Structures are given as structure tokens and as C-alpha cells.
Amino acid sequence: MESIEPSEKPVITKGIDHFFFNFYNILKFIGRFFVEAFRPPYEIREFIRQCYYIGNKSLLLITLTGFITGLVFTKQSRPSLAEFGATSWLPSLISIAVLRALAPLVTALICAGKVGSSIGAELASMKVTEQIDAMEVSAINPFKYLVVTRIMATTVCLPILMFYNGIVAMFGSFVDIHLNEQTSLTTFFQNGFQNISFLDFTSSLIKATVYGFTVGIVSCYQGYHATQGTQGVGKAANVSVVISMFLIFIEEVIIVQVINALR
Amino acid sequence: MKDFTPEIDWNDKVISIRGLYKSFGPNHVLQGIDLDLYKGENIVVLGRSGTGKSVLIKIISRLLYPDAGTVNVLGQEVPNLDVVTLRELRLKVGFCFQNGALYDSMTVGENLAFPLRRNMPGMSKAERDKRVALVLEAVGLSQTVDQMPSELSGGQRKRIGIGRTLILRPEIMLYDEPTAGLDPITCTEINNLINEVQRRFKTSSIIITHDLTCAKATGDKIAVMKGGKFIRQGSFDEVFGSNDDELIQEFYDYNFIQ
Ligand SMILES: Nc1ncnc2c1ncn2[C@@H]1O[C@H](COP(=O)(O)OP(=O)(O)OP(=O)(O)O)[C@@H](O)[C@H]1O
Ligand SMILES: [Mg+2]
């Protein structure tokens, strides 16, 4: 396996070197992902297993945060709308906020924390205990088996979880609106979905897919290139989460700019 | 000493290494290694910790690339192989890791079946189970088939690791410190297992160790590594017959006085 340490240099140049070195390596990693992902045989079983793990790990947390976001956001928005006597706008306000911004971001951050860290730690521990090398020498392609399946799983699962999160958030909001304004479920959803455009829908789908890919790439990269024995495992998990979250926010800003330009 | 005479074919070199160099940055690990392994032979590579023994066998199985030199395994030049040929070669070269490197999300049985499932997709489940049972019997751990690796002792893990390597019926076995960190009785068991593998499966092996007992029990030839080179090669008695050399003396001290 290729070494990923830059050579001995003064601190500052070394820092810059390190940055570009990592950048180059990540690009190479992404490139390798695309090459191996589309080359048969496909690891369908392992992919499904990973999807199941991701759902299993994050479903409870996503349900909980979804419900609470919806509920709290409704509660917080009501006074401002009430000033204009416009509380009947609440459903459409909430649905736009949830679908456009909250659901993708909340789901992505939870997956980064829960799934990213566990992928990072799992691959790192396989790396430092030579399990990845062991696959390699027994003629098994560890990149395909471990990395490709995980990145595909996060990329596919995150949008699904995002929509689930959105629906749960809407229910959270409905509970609060129902208790205060006695709106029925049908009216609530009719009002809510009135103002949702196809662009909202697709842009969220794209966002969630990009975030899922980011979490997968970052955590797999960190895990796959872990060093320094057991210490490296904790570091890989930690760095996976930090970098994933950071990138998710940057991507959010960029995607929102692009979408607004299209709107 | 072995209780059988190994069948060595002195006309058939399965591994031939010439002028092998490898550095990590300023750390010059291998500095001109020459080594020949003949069919059916067990070579023991002795050397202190950090001399680059693991690096050597990792280069043989192309987990690492050499900086210079030729590494010929079963007639193929390892550093230049394309992916497909490398894959075929790796099926014939087994690698036993220092700590077993068992997949800890799988049971022992699944660990053993995994290389078969991946590399021989045509094989039926019944046949796979039969091979797993056979290998478990060969390493003497049939009862552990449903256990997780975390439930095994260090010695058991190493034996399962050897078993998992054997299951693909390799022609060459590379053992990385098979006896390190084990008590003398377990060491003897592992040594016997290595010899049994040589006798039963007709493998050629490179055994890396710093344990003289293991070297004496399993090696048809001993190669002593120091400063990135082999400073001595020969039978155990040739290498250790005259203990004038400082390093050889060190080994004696380490193994017998401690
Ligand atoms: N991937 C790597 N990157 C950088 N340095 C490495 C790498 N692998 C090994 N080294 C260095 O190479 C040297 C030899 O390591 P190696 O693992 O081969 O030693 P060894 O002889 O097997 O020792 P031990 O008996 O402790 O296993 C060490 O100094 C180590 O730091
Ligand atoms: Mg070693």
C-alpha cells in the first residue's frame, strides 16, 4: 500500500505540503471509488448489509430530532406570524423550512456523527490490526468490499433518511398546530405541500446525496489510511466527524447559492 | 528437529530475491537482500525487532513496493505485476500475520470460509464447510468454529490465522513471527503445526522469528538479518556452530539466559 506521509521539510512548507498531499490523496481516493464502483462484480450483499447498519444506527436519533425540530420550529415561529394574524401560514412555512433546509442538514449532521464516526473507527481498527492487509493478500479487493460498499450505502441512505426526517418533522409540527389551531391532518398537509416546488424537492435530494457521499468518502478515507496503532482508531473516528461536518456546511452554502440562482 | 525429511527440489526456485532495497524516508530498512527459497524448503529469517523482517515479506506479497532490486515469486516479477496476475499469484502465496489479523466481525468459521467465498464463487456451501472443517482439524481447533475471534487466546488466533491462510491451498507460506508472545508449550505446538503444514501440504515457507527454538525446529535453512542485509545463511548448525559473531551471541543471550 502506498505511504501517505510527506517528506521531511521545514514546518511551514511541510504544512502546505501536507495539505496538498492529503488533497491529492483524497482526489485519488475518490477517483478510485468511481473506477471500482462501476466495475463488476458488484458487492450487493455487503451494500445491503451496510444500508441496514446505517438505518439501524441512526433511525431512532433521526426520528427523535425530526420530531423535535418540527415541534420547536413551529412553536418558535408562531408568535411572529401571530403578530400579522397569519398563523394559517404556519404549515407552508414549516414545510418549506423543513424540506429546503432543516431535514437535509439535520440528517447529514446526525449521520456524520453517528455513521461517519463508526465507519472511521471500524475501518481504522481493521487497518491497524492488519485485517485490510489480510484481505489484500488473500486476493480479496478490500477497497471494493469495504470502501465502495460503505460509500454507496451512505450516499443512498442519506436521502432516504432525509425524507423520513422531513416527514417526522412535519408530524412534530402538526402535533403543535393541531393542539393550538385545531387544524386537521388533511388540511395541514394540503396547506403544507401547496408551496413545495419540484425544485425544492430535487435540490434537497441532491443536497442529501452530496452529504451522504461526503460522509462516506471522508470517513472511509480516514479509516482506510489510519496509522499509529490503536491511537489512530480514535483519531480516525474523531477526524471523520469533524471534517464531514465542516464540509457539509461548506457544501450547504455552495448548493444554496446555486439553487437560488436557478430559482 | 523434524521427525521427517522434507522433500526439497533444489532445481526449483519458488522465490528469488536479488539486491532488494527499501527505505522509509531517512530510515533505510533493507539494504541489499539476496534470498532463494526452493520448492519444499522452510527458510527461517532471524533478526532483531525493527530490522525489516516484516517489510521483506510484505514486499514479497506486494503490500509494499521495493525501491530497487528484483523479487521473483513463482516465476513472476512481483513489483511489475498487473492486477489480474497479482490476484492469481496471491492465491498461491499465503501470508500469516503477526497477530492473526482475524476479521473480528466474523466467527472463526466465517473467517475461514471468507477467502473461499470470495475467490471460489463456484464452490458449493457443503464443499466449503468441508474444507473449513478440514483446516480446523489440521490446526487442532475444531471446537472454536462458532466462536468470535475476541473469545480466542493469542495462540489460538495465530493458529486460526494460519488455517485461514492454508484454506486456499497456497504453494508458499509466509509466517510473520508465528511464535512471538506465546508460552513455550504453545510455541512447540505452533512449530509442529508449521512442520505439519510443510509435510502435509508440500509448501515452501519463509518463517520470520526471533525465537531460536522455533528457528531450530522449523528451519531447513537459517538466514540472519542485520543492518538490512543477511549476514549469515546456512543450516542451523552452520550458523550457530561457531558463536564468535556478536549478533549470534546476542541471540543466544536473548533466548537462553532470559
Ligand atoms: N509502512 C511503513 N511506513 C513507514 N515505516 C515503516 C513501515 N513499515 C515498517 N516501517 C519501518 O521499517 C522498520 C522495520 O519494520 P519491520 O516491521 O519490518 O520490523 P520487524 O523486523 O518485522 O520487527 P518486529 O520483530 O518488531 O516485527 C521499522 O523501523 C519501521 O518503523
Ligand atoms: Mg514484524
Image (cartoon, grey):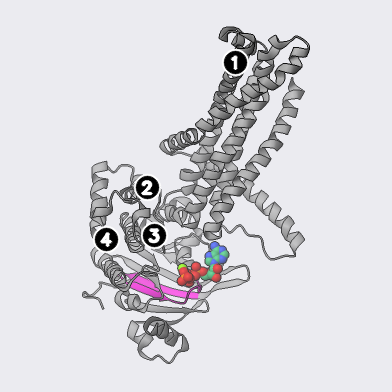
Instruction: Judge by depth and name the residue closer to the eye, B197 or A165.
Output: A165
Q: Position of residue B218 (x, y in %)?
A: 31, 74
Q: Which residue is mark 1?
A: A174
Image-quadrant location for residue A201: top right
- Circle 1 marks a residue in which chain? A
For residue B100, the mark is 3
Asked if the magenta segment contains residue B40, the reply would be: yes
User: Which callout, 4 or 2, points at the residue further toward the start of the chain?
Assistant: 2
Q: Are the residues tagged 3 and 2 within 8 Å (C-beta)?
A: no
Q: Which residue is mark 2?
A: B106
Q: Which residue is mark 4?
A: B139
Q: Secondary structure at mark 2?
A: loop
Q: Does the beta carbon at disc 4 come under 8 Å from ligand 2?
A: no
- In front: label 1 or label 3: 1
Asked if the magenta segment contains residue A43, the reply would be: no
Q: Amino acid at mark 2?
A: Met
Q: Position of residue A183 (x, y in %)?
A: 61, 8
**Chief SS of the magenta region:** strand
- Circle 2 marks a residue in which chain? B
Find the distance from the CA under tag 4 to the CA under tag 1: 63 Å
